[in-house]
Structures are given as C-alpha cells and as structure tokens.
Amino acid sequence: KNQVEQSPQSLIILEGKNCTLQCNYTVSPFSNLRWYKQDTGRGPVSLTIMTFSENTKSNGRYTATLDADTKQSSLHITASQLSDSASYICVVSKAAGNKLTFGGGTRVLVKP
Amino acid sequence: EPEVTQTPSHQVTQMGQEVILRCVPISNHLYFYWYRQILGQKVEFLVSFYNNEISEKSEIFDDQFSVERPDGSNFTLKIRSTKLEDSAMYFCASLPASGVYEQYFGPGTRLTVT
C-alpha cells in the first residue's frame, strides 16, 4: 500500500534552535517528494520538491534531503523562528498523474 | 503572485442537502485537484481533472461526488447528499502542466454537516 509516514508526530523547540523531521515512504512508482508547510486552517504551501536524482534541496532556513534507495527524507529547520510553528507535511507523488500522497505531518511548536 | 481562491470559506449544511464548493484555479493552469482533510487527519486525495474530464479519483470519490469546470475558470466540487462524515476541510489545487511542478493549494472550504 502506498504510504507516507512521518516522525515525530509533534515537537516543541526553543526559538533559535534547529530541528529535523523524518519521513519514510512506500509510494511506488516514485516521481518526486515534497515538503509542505501548513498553518492551522490553511492550505499547504510548498517548501521543496525533489526528484529521485536529487539528494538535497534548500529553501532559506529549510533544507530537505532525500535517499531514494532507502525511501527516506528529512526536513531540517535551522535557527527556528516563532513563525515556523506549523505542521510540516511530507508528500510523495507517483510517476503519473501527479496524485499526491500525504503523510500525517509533524506539528512543530516554536517557543520563545 | 497568482493564487488559487475558494468560496465559501465556511459552509454549514444539513445532512442530506447538496453542497457546491467553488474554486478558481490559477489562470493558465491545466490540472485541477480536490483534496479533503478531516479534522486531525491526513490530507486525502479525492480527484484530479484534466482536459475537462476526471483523470483519477480515489475510493472516497463515490457517486455522491462530482466535479466540473462549467465556464473555463471555476472548478466545482458537488456533494449530492451530504453525510456527517463529509465534514472536513476541502482544498482545491492546480498545476500548470504535467511533471514536477508545484501544486498550488487554495485556502480551503470548511464544510460542516449537521
């Protein structure tokens, strides 16, 4: 079954600290992996998109990694800010149709 | 920056009633999607639409659901006879072309079925 699993489910970090979120997937065939940020009650906003040939991609303080062999990805947030408080969702797209399979998300709370 | 818009932001309806959720995708985008997110759960794919027809749908998208693009700009999701379990956030998304492009999501419509 095509699935995307994320860990941890939630985490609390202090402002200015770094954190890393994990994603494992079984979606096949694989086209690309995306990380989205979703504020409560809002639509997801894309942070990064990576194909199987890309190992890392950055967007400001967000850096995503991908290991297509082990089907794992991570999202690293550097020097967290209060505005980083949100759910971070790992999403995998199959090779055709651009249908997205979503993970359950990691809820991040940044405290001052 | 262009964005996907959705109306209404919140819809309350009684069980058994029909609802139509509206979306205006980004101009010149070719692929359109509906997703839903039940409170506290994952975002789930409902349906994709391209070239005026459904290209893929999930098992959630049964005969009670339909989509159409009536006028070349709006993209609608109709639920014919709502059930309590249809209560969720419904997100519309659009994509400029097939391939590794960003799917742009709308802000969502919160549907509450009472």
Image (cartoon, grey):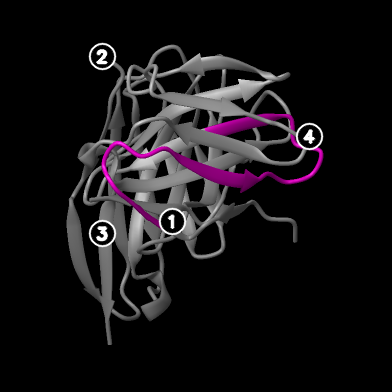
Which disc is residue A37 wearing?
Answer: 1
Q: Can residue B82 be seen in this view?
A: yes
Which disc is residue A107 wearing?
Answer: 3
How busy is the neighbourhood of tag 1: few (under 14 within 10 Å), some, or many (20 plus)? many
Q: Which amino acid does label 2 sit on?
A: Lys
- The residue drawn where x is 62% and y is 32% is B32
Label 4 sits on a secondary structure element that is loop
Q: Distance between the residues labelled 2 and 4?
A: 36 Å
Q: Where is residue B49 in the image (x, y as percent from the top left)?
A: 61, 23
Which residue bears the numbered disc 4? B72
Which disc is residue A1 wearing?
Answer: 2
Q: Position of residue B114 (x, y in %)?
A: 23, 51
Q: Is there one chain holding both mark 3 and mark 1?
A: yes
Q: Badge 1 sits on which subunit?
A: A
Determine whether, in the image, residue B100 is placed left or right of residue B15: right
Q: Can residue A100 be seen in this view?
A: no
- The residue drawn where x is 42% and y is 76% is A83
Q: Badge 3 sits on which subunit?
A: A
Q: Badge 4 sits on which subunit?
A: B
Q: What residue type is labelled 1?
A: Lys
- The residue drawn where x is 73% and y is 35% is B96
Q: Is there one chain holding both mark 2 and mark 4?
A: no
How busy is the neighbourhood of tag 2: few (under 14 within 10 Å), some, or many (20 plus)? few
State the extent of the magenta-drawn residues as a range.
B11-33
Q: Is there one chain holding both mark 1 and mark 4?
A: no
Q: Is there one chain holding both mark 1 and mark 2?
A: yes
Depth-wise, is mark 3 or mark 4 nearer the camera?
Answer: 4
